[in-house]
Image (cartoon, rainbow, N blue to C red):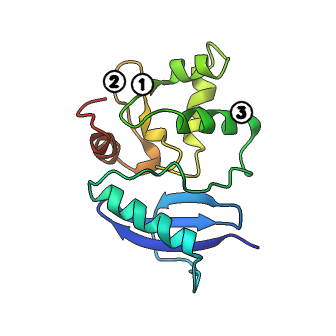
């Protein structure tokens, strides 16, 4: 089955969710016109959309149970994604701390590249990674304000 797409509106903007039979393989903010959309999404996709919409309205949801398809990631990107998914809501890590957890001290830049390549925003919570000297930017979401809003949803008022 080729990946399918569905775009939906949230309190933080329009999001495009991409999935395969294995799980969600992409979650990005939609920037342009919708591409060809799936005519009918499976129930688990619609449940994921519902939970994301409620979560982004300010009612935190358990998003950990949404199935993911990480098969497009390199082994190191997958390791970083797994570490991010194991990070509790409301907890942040620096790139250096994440490198240590990955068993690669001194590899903060490599971790940064893996985080930047994350195709599944929010569900692989790259918003929980902060610069050593503060929250830092967030190119994936287009603005530091979106990152701050996601962290606030998890109970943090600053990075």
* Residues at discs 1 and 2 in contact (Cβ within 8 Å): yes
Q: Is residue 72 above or below residue 98?
A: below
Q: Which mark is residue 131?
A: 1
Q: Quadrant of residue 118?
A: top right
User: In this view of the protein, which residue sits in the foreground, 47 or 18?
Assistant: 47
How far across and down, in percent of the image, does residue 147 sit?
A: 35, 43
Q: Residue at x 27, y 37 (%)?
A: 155
Question: Does residue 75 appear to the left or right of 147 in the view shown?
Answer: right
Determine the residue located farthest toward the left in the rendered image: 157
* Label 1 to label 3: alpha-carbon separation: 20 Å
Q: Residue at x 71, y 61 (%)?
A: 22
- The residue wearing badge 3 is 76
* Label 1 to label 2: alpha-carbon separation: 5 Å
* Residues at discs 1 and 3 in contact (Cβ within 8 Å): no
Question: Does residue 153 appear to the left or right of 35 in the view shown?
Answer: left
Q: Which mark is residue 134?
A: 2
How far across and down, in percent of the image, does residue 150 sit?
A: 33, 45
In the rendered image, the quadrant that contains the C terminus is top left
Question: Does residue 90 appear to the left or right of 129 in the view shown?
Answer: left
């Amino acid at each position: 089955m080729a990946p399918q797409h569905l775009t939906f509106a949230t309190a933080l903007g329009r999001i495009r969710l991409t999935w395969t039979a294995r799980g969600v393989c992409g979650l990005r903010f939609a920037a342009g016109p919708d591409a060809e959309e799936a005519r009918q999404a499976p129930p688990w996709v619609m449940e994921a959309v519902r939970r994301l919409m409620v979560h982004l309205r300010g009612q935190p949801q358990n998003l950990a149970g949404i199935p993911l398809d990480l098969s497009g990631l390199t082994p190191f990107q997958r390791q970083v994604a797994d570490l991010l998914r194991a990070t509790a809501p409301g907890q942040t890590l620096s790139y250096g701390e994440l490198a240590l957890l990955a068993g690669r001290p001194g590899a903060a830049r490599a971790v940064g590249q893996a985080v930047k390549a994350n195709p599944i925003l929010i569900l692989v919570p790259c918003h929980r990674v902060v610069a050593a000297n503060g929250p830092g930017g967030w190119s994936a979401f287009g603005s530091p304000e979106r990152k701050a809003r996601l962290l606030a949803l998890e109970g943090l008022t600053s990075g």
